[in-house]
Amino acid sequence: MLETGLITKVNSDTFTVKYQDNYYDCKARGKFRNEHFKPLVGDIVNFNKDKKVIEEVTTRKNVLERPPVANIDIALVVTSLKKPDLNLTLLDKLLSIITIKGITPIIVLTKLDLLTKEELQDITNLFNYYKKIGYLVYTNEEISSLKKALKNKIVTVCGQTGAGKSTLINYFDENLNLATNEISEALGRGKHTTRIVELFEILDFYIVDTPGFSALDLVNYSIEDIQNSFLEFKNYTCKFNDCKHLKEIGCGILEGVDKKEILLSRYNNYVRFIKESSDDRSKLFKK
Ligand SMILES: Nc1nc2c(ncn2[C@@H]2O[C@H](COP(=O)(O)OP(=O)(O)OP(=O)(O)O)[C@@H](O)[C@H]2O)c(=O)[nH]1
Ligand SMILES: [Mg+2]
Ligand SMILES: [Zn+2]
């Protein structure tokens, strides 16, 4: 007899499956390993609760590679403004990847307390742009409104190491008491405080804590996917078919940049991502 449960934790080859408020530490059937298939946190699985073996993984709604999770509704893009400093390329890249995967991103700003008044004003202006183009933006001081936005969802956090992901999850539920680390230490050792990918149940939503990372690639994404993930581009029409919006004279997107309506850092990141994705793809064809 197989039961259907949810993987809430993966610790090397042990998968914790939640079924009817009980947790079972399971192994995956050998065939998964042979097929190089690894069950992920967020997977809905059919498993034998007596033998503690996962037999089947049901079709996934989506998969994120970093963090390695499946069936996610919302990804909180935890964005530190200082220590570590704001990294707009990483932010835009995460927003693009998450958007392409059909997951709703929510930007959560952290470490506002480390900013001067002037810096805070610049940050407010900057993120008003992100709000204007359609992203939800909260700070880690707005816990109760953030909680409302997460009701009944499966949520993951992503963002740089030391950005404050575990700290944020602790704000959601003090009882969790997840390990956090001083940024200098976390970066100095080149290690993440959070090692195990784990899903926590918080009243009416689930959230996965994951370690941070600093690099991601866009190898699997098409130019069209990347273009569509820049939400503000939809407000412009480009008279050229298949325009890459790189240097074509009369390109509608470039006009938006010239008029300073499209944020320059966003446009520059767009160019960077298109190049990255084409570079990687051209490598596939090299002898
Ligand atoms: N001043 C300030 N410090 C913060 C804030 N949020 C988190 N921190 C601190 O930043 C450090 C790193 O926070 P963590 O929550 O461990 O960061 P993380 O994103 O989980 O890091 P990894 O698990 O290594 O990926 C800790 O010392 C936190 O106390 C904030 O809003 N303001
Ligand atoms: Mg952490
Ligand atoms: Zn164009």
Image (tube, rainbow, N blue to C red):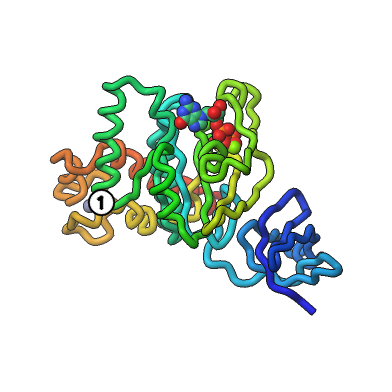
Front residue of 264 and 142: 142
Please identify the residue farthest to the bottom as the structure is shown: 1
Identify whether 212 is placed above or below 113: below
Taking the image as shown, residue 34 lies to the left or right of residue 185, namely right
Taking the image as shown, residue 130 lies to the left or right of residue 175, namely left
Mark 1 residue type: Glu
What residue is disc 1 on? 232
Please identify the residue farthest to the right as the structure is shown: 51
For the point 38% across and 48% down, which residue is it?
145
Q: Position of residue 283 (x, y in %)?
A: 52, 48
Taking the image as shown, residue 262 lies to the left or right of residue 159, namely left
Identify whether 224 is placed above or below 189: below
Q: Position of residue 259 (x, y in %)?
A: 13, 40
Q: Residues within 10 Å of mark 1 (few under 14, many from 20)?
A: many
Q: Position of residue 208 (x, y in %)?
A: 58, 50
> Is residue 149 at all visible to an observer of this figure?
yes
Q: How many marks?
A: 1
> Is residue 287 at all visible to an observer of this figure?
no
Front residue of 177 and 135: 177
Quadrant of the rendered image containing residue 93: top left
Q: Secondary structure at mark 1?
A: helix
Quadrant of the rendered image containing residue 129: top left
For the point 29% across and 42% down, which residue is it?
267
Q: Is mark 1 within 8 Å of ligand 3?
A: no
Q: Position of residue 137 (x, y in %)?
A: 35, 45
Front residue of 245 and 114: 114
Looking at the rendered image, the quarter that the N terminus falls into is: bottom right
Front residue of 158 and 20: 20
